[in-house]
Image (cartoon, coloured by chain):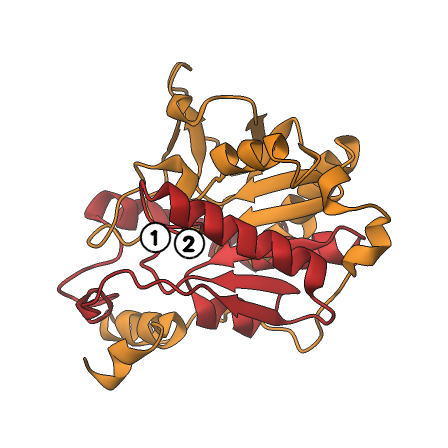
């Protein structure tokens, strides 16, 4: 095992090197902040076993039983019901490590099966009636002023207490 | 996704983010992060390993409740494989991250974004 593989992959360095080799002069500027917002769980005011959990994924989910429509060129946040069996869902995402893995098992990036089992076990109170799908965007400004506020809006409508986010 | 987590958190919703790109997520800085040292595509566990998926999600729920400060990362105790060679060729000429069609789509989108940025509109 090389030093590099002994620890996690440095994607920022790798992508910079990759695109420089492809002839791009300017590297992508990854989002970076010095401050981190924080809402302590205690502020929710109830036990996790009584909390409603919101779910977000970047996996570009689609329903198997829906007619294939044209892709949304605006790439806006959308939602689908959380009570769909995962067998009825699939991911349309192209950007993942297609050499090492697949996106065939939905619960690897949208853990609905296990959230429902945690409800049955009394670990969480409920899952929000819909989950949100957000695109991974080159344009951080759009994520900040369009996508993230839309997710917040939907979660407030659904009276979500805490949120689980899975980044493919 | 990290930006969305930060926005929810800033507006009163505790979050936990699951991911496999540790450097990107920690560079952005999120409140709570569960890191799996897996290929991109498996933030909540290995395909068809239900016990692992359940355990990874459980770690995240524990972190939601227990974190006392922002910027907390929990590393899952799993290896993708005993052989770590899957890391060697990530983002290399031998293994382009996107297939040709997805690359074309990405470049078109990027160019569109640049055009939008030039006019300073969304």
Q: Residues within 10 Å of mark 2 (few under 14, many from 20)?
A: some
Residue A1: x percent and y percent?
A: 18, 80
Q: Dot 1 corresponds to which residue?
A: B107
Rendering quarter of residue A7: bottom left
Chain B painted colour: red
Q: Is residue A31 visible?
A: no
Occupied quadrant, residue A19? bottom left
Rendered orange, the chain in question is A
Report how far apart the C-alphas of labels 2 and 1 lie in the structure: 5 Å
Q: Quadrant of the N terminus of chain B?
A: bottom right
Q: Chain of mark 2?
A: B
Q: Chain of mark 1?
A: B
- Residue at the (72%, 52%) spot, across then down: B8
x and y, in percent, of residue B111 in the image: 41, 53
State the mark number for residue A16.
none
Does the rendering let one see residue B34? yes
Q: Nearer the viewer, residue A88 or B122?
A: A88
> Residue at point 72% right, 54% down?
B14
Residue B79 location (% of width, % of height): 31, 64
Please identify the residue farthest to the left as the structure is shown. Answer: B94
The answer to whether marks 2 and 1 mark residues whose Cβ atoms lie closer than 8 Å is: yes
Q: Are marks 2 and 1 on the same chain?
A: yes
- Which numbered tag is attached to residue B110? 2
Left or right, B85 with reference to B33: left
Compared with residue B109, is residue B82 higher up or lower down, i.e. above or below? below
Q: Residue at x 28, y 45 (%)?
A: B102
Left-right relation of A17 to A47 = left
Q: Secondary structure at mark 2?
A: helix
Q: Residues within 10 Å of mark 1 (few under 14, many from 20)?
A: few
Nearest to the observer: residue A116 or residue A134: A116
Q: Position of residue A57 (x, y in %)?
A: 51, 43
């Amino acid at each position: 095992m090389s030093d590099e593989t002994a620890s996690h992959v440095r994607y920022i360095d790798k992508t910079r090197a990759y695109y420089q080799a492809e002839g791009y002069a300017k590297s992508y500027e990854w989002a970076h902040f010095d401050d981190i917002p924080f809402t302590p769980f205690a502020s929710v005011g109830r036990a996790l076993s009584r909390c409603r959990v919101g779910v977000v994924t970047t996996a570009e989910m689609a329903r198997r039983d829906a007619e294939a429509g044209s892709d949304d060129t605006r790439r806006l946040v959308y939602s689908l019901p959380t009570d769909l069996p995962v067998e009825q869902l699939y991911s349309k995402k192209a950007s993942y490590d297609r050499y090492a893995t697949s996106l065939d098992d939905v619960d690897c990036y949208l853990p609905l099966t296990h959230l429902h089992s945690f409800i049955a076990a009394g670990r969480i109170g409920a899952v929000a009636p819909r989950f949100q799908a957000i695109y991974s965007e080159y344009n951080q400004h759009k994520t900040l002023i369009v996508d993230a506020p839309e997710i917040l809006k939907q979660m407030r409508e659904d009276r979500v207490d805490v949120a689980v986010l899975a980044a493919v | 996704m990290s930006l969305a987590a930060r926005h929810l958190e800033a507006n009163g919703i505790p979050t936990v983010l699951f991911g496999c790109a540790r450097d990107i997520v920690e560079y952005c800085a999120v409140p709570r992060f569960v890191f799996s040292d897996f290929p991109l595509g498996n933030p909540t566990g290995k395909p068809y390993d239900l016990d692992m998926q359940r355990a990874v999600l459980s770690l995240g729920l524990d972190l939601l409740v227990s974190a006392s400060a922002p910027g907390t990362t929990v590393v899952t105790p799993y290896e993708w494989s005993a052989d770590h060679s899957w890391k060697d060729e990530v983002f290399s000429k031998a293994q382009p991250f996107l297939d040709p069609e997805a690359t074309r789509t990405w470049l078109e989108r990027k160019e569109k974004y640049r055009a939008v940025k030039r006019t300073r509109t969304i």
